[in-house]
Image (cartoon, rainbow, N blue to C red):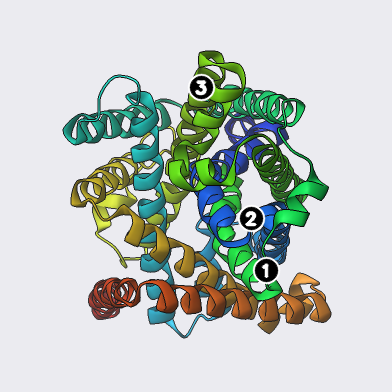
Amino acid sequence: MSKHIIHRKREKSLGLLEVVAIALGGMVGGGIFTILGISVSMIGIYTPIAMMLGGAIAAFAAYSYIKLGVYYKLEGESYIFIKKTFPNAPFAAALIGWWVIFGYISTLALYAFTFSSYAIADYSDSYLLKISVAGAVLLFFALVNIWSVKGMGKIEDIMVYSKLVILAIISFVLINNSNTSIPTLIENQEEVEFFSILIVASITFVAYEGFQLVINAINEMENPSKNIRRAIYISIAMATLIYTVIAFGAILAISFEDIIANKEYALASGANKVIGNLGNDLVVLGALLATSSAISGTIFGASRQMSIISTDGLMPTFLSKRNDKNIPTYAILIMALCAFALICTGSLKLILEFGSITFLIVCLIITIANFKIRKSTNSSTFVLMCAMLVLVSSSFLILYYEVMTDIYQIYFILILYFLLTIGAVYYSKKALVKT
């Protein structure tokens, strides 16, 4: 018995810093380098406000994940919450599982492609080379996750906290070398409706997606009852601060025209103009660290959820197999492979929009699940009602934006939902036959 206890203690290899790093790694990835251009093109100087509102949406979404995570204390987050809360609805759990896993795969593809774009930006524009570099970085972090949980945690620490320092330096440099002032920008700003700010805040949610990954580290986490809540709220607060300060620095130092024209390269081009090649190199380094930590953190958490789902027979069963270190090797490799396949399709923007809408809808369903057992999880009815209102409104705003800007994206998203639903139906029926 004592040996078993000692073994269990050794398995708890992730402290608060490592868990925060996993959450921040999943959040502060490609988002900050892509959302800025969209935000400025729509609402200009009010971009930092939208970033703060995006953080508030994420905090409401996180409330039920924290409560259910502490209550159930199981890997699998979204999937396991629905499975346990609605035990007589296996198809619902399967559907959530398929949606969430594909959402994570789509964000992995985005992060890897963003990494490759920055990595070779000064050397080549070859699309084939970008795909190759993206595949290589996916394989590298898949192998890191297979190698060791503790090793992955330490590497994640280094990448995440290094990128925070770099992003802080970038923000300071931009603000210190501002070309204008807030009163001047306000004076020249065209009238913007608050509705538009809310739309951007909803779109910004994709930059906060990733806090859920903390739940999947529960078996390797020290003191999960306290550290789940601490890690998620600390990471959301830090991500909100990072996005807000960088947005503030960017709109002061870089012309709106440059931000909109350069899109994800806006920070690099702006820093280049402010402090020369050193600024460009600093932003590129920050982008590489940001996307690297996002890839590693997403692979870590999402592969464990995939393993749990396949253990229940709702995905191919070989994905449930784990090595002697309790690491889901096959799930990790398949996630990396699927993300690479998505990169090769060249439809990353559409897939990203799918991921954003999917995570909002899933967060809404998780909030409803928590509402059902709110007395058991000791959750506030008022907070849950507010969270449901916020998530419903945010989902509607993104759909409205998509319909107004490109209706074909909605068609593509519906096709993806249809295909994923077929997968969920097939495996849920297969699992019922076995039982």
* Label ID, residue 192: 1
Calculate the distance from the C-alpha at mark 2 to the C-alpha at mark 1.
Answer: 8 Å
Residue 192 appearing in the image: yes
The x, y position of residue 319, in whole percent, is: 29, 51
> Which residue is painted at 39% across and 29% down in the image?
118
Compared to residue 118, the image places residue 337 above or below, namely below
Q: Amino acid at mark 2?
A: Gly
**Along the horizontal axis of the image, is 141 left or right of 252?**
left
**Along the horizontal axis of the image, is 289 left or right of 375?**
left
Taking depth in this image into account, of 253 and 265 the one nearest to the observer is 253
Compared to residue 375, the image places residue 68 above or below, namely above
The x, y position of residue 316, in whole percent, is: 24, 59
CB-based contact (under 8 Å), mark 2 and mark 1: yes
Neighbourhood count class around disc 3 (C-alpha, 10 Å): few under 14, some 14–19, many 20 upward? many
Which of labels 3 and 2 is toward the front? 2
**Along the horizontal axis of the image, is 333 left or right of 297?**
left
The x, y position of residue 256, in whole percent, is: 58, 46
Q: Amino acid at mark 3?
A: Asn
Calculate the distance from the C-alpha at mark 3 to the C-alpha at mark 2.
Answer: 23 Å
Provide the residue designation for mark 3: 280
